[in-house]
Image (cartoon, helix red, strand yellow):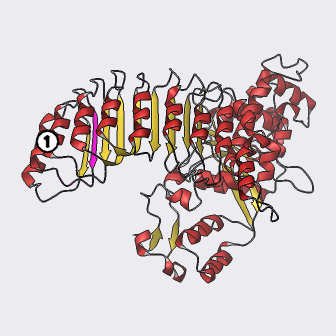
Amino acid sequence: SAQPPDWFISHWWGEPIADFLCCVEEHAYLRAAATSTAYWICAYANRQHSLSEELVKDPRETSFFRATQLAKGVLLVLNCESEHHGPAMPFTRIWCAFEEYVATSKSRAQPLLLDIAAVERVEGDLSTMMKRAQQMNLSNEQVLELHSEYSRVRNNKRARILTDGETDRDVYPGDTFERTELWSNIRDGDMIRLGGEWQADPNDRGFSRMYGTGKVARDQKFPLSIVESSLGLNLEKALASMEEDRKHILNTIAGRDLDAEPLLEHENYDDTNRKLRAIFALAIWRQTAVNYPRKPPDDDDDDAFEERLNKMDPLEDMGLPQILAADSGRTALKLDLSDLTKMRNPSLAALRRGLPPALQELEVTLAGCELITDEGLAALSQKLPASLRSIRLDLTGVPVGEKGVEALVADLPTSLGALSLCLDADGEDVLMPLASGLPTHLEELKLEVGALSAGFCRALAEKLTDKLKSLTLKASSAECLDEGVGLLFEKLPLSLEALEFEVNGSDGLSDAGLSAVAQKLPIGLKTLILNFEKNDSIGDEGLGALGRQLPETLTTFRIRSELPAQVSDSGLSALVGH
């Protein structure tokens, strides 16, 4: 029976079969492939004794092209350099070039995913490293990271994969470990029991990053020699065993007559090259951003050395901003730079220069980047692409001040419909400029701040217009919560369909405050999530008032709070009864 391919494998036939299988096995694991998942491999899918029937004149009539149109993604298998050939040989072969053109073009309603794999040698195996870990008395986190790394080693080789976005494994790794004496130093509280095995808590979304299994960790481990050689790739220079194939493929890419003399340059060549180069530029963005020189042993002037570092731009030195910006068709960019404690302001200026001109969605995580200041934030915010529709920026742990916040909200694009900001700031000197500077054309707004004040709530309320459909406001604490909530909810627009409000570490919301919330809920609200986890001041009266005022349009409702002694069964019944 017919077996439509799920993944099309693009490779050059020159890699060892063991390396090839290692890449496919790792890919199947990362993509949580079922046993029925089909990979299209030309050597096995095409009948080699009648191959001429498949290699017709028009590349779009070949089995290669037809398979890509059925698959959901392409797995490109690259090679490291050896004594016989250079790295990334598929970029020098014309049929592979055609497959990468198809993978990156917009010829399908549902774009193809493009995952890139390679194998590199590693020293040691799982058994050896686990014994070494036991002898060294490593921490739980270090042991789990070693296990994640070496459990995938085959014959001293490890497949590395750049995935097109995150995979299911990044959210729920699902790695299981047998409980042996090795795990005696792992606290029961850190793991959950599943039958006779032990497994990482699937509710911990930070697990994959902490233990080196997430996309961020994978990207950093991809062979650097392949990445560097691919930053300047030119697929139009790829060769073929038969020159006619090269002619037909280049003319297909350029949209010309198949028998015409192929052009040396064409926009479609450049477009494919730019997309592929940008993938590799983003793969090494993190490690490049902190690639600063070490202080020379004979340099005793700490201040002067620090001043020199603050002027360096390692991203610019590698040309990464120019490579990323050249990917002019890119509409979405997600970049996790969290916990780069050595990254400095010039890296944010470089990122701004690297934003593609047609970008519509931008998500940057800077959590824990303690050397970033207002200067860096201002550089990132300067003249953002006019096409941006969504910005998500995580500044948790970044020392943001008034000037940085003012610069961030001062010149947001008029096309912006969704804005999400996370920052630790809790002083009105920082939060007031944020609230007063917000644009009034937003449809979605999410703010996570340190502390709420009545003044901030009042200023924020003035920026809420009938265009707003979704509002999320979270804070770790609050002052005068009843007053602040009253001021905010008084101005909630009738257009609001989703509302999430969370304040932890405060006992300021009373029954009167909750009643005020209930009375001001928009009548068309569909989703309501309230979290007052550390609040022990709410009683039966407040819960009853909330229950009576819930909009009839509501389809999703959650409330979380401490249940103090004054909340009785009747209070809970009054809440859920409506």
Q: Position of residue 539 (x, y in %)?
A: 12, 50
Residue at horizontal 43 percent and vertical 34 percent from the top? 434
Q: Position of residue 45 (x, y in %)?
A: 72, 43
Rendered image quadrant of residue 313:
top right
Provide the residue span drawn in magenta. 525-538
Left-right relation of 493 to 224: left
Q: Nearer the viewer, residue 431 or 33?
A: 431
Q: Position of residue 76 (x, y in %)?
A: 72, 44
Q: In which quarter of the image is the N terminus?
A: top right
Amino acid type, mark 1? Ala
Residue at horizontal 33 percent and vertical 21 percent from the top? 466
User: Is residue 66 in view from this perspective?
Assistant: no
Rendered image quadrant of residue 68:
top right
Name the secondary structure under disc 1.
helix
Q: How crowded is mark 1: few (under 14 residues within 10 Å), some or many (20 or more)?
A: some
Residue at label 1? Answer: 512
Residue at horizontal 75 percent and vertical 41 percent from the top? 46
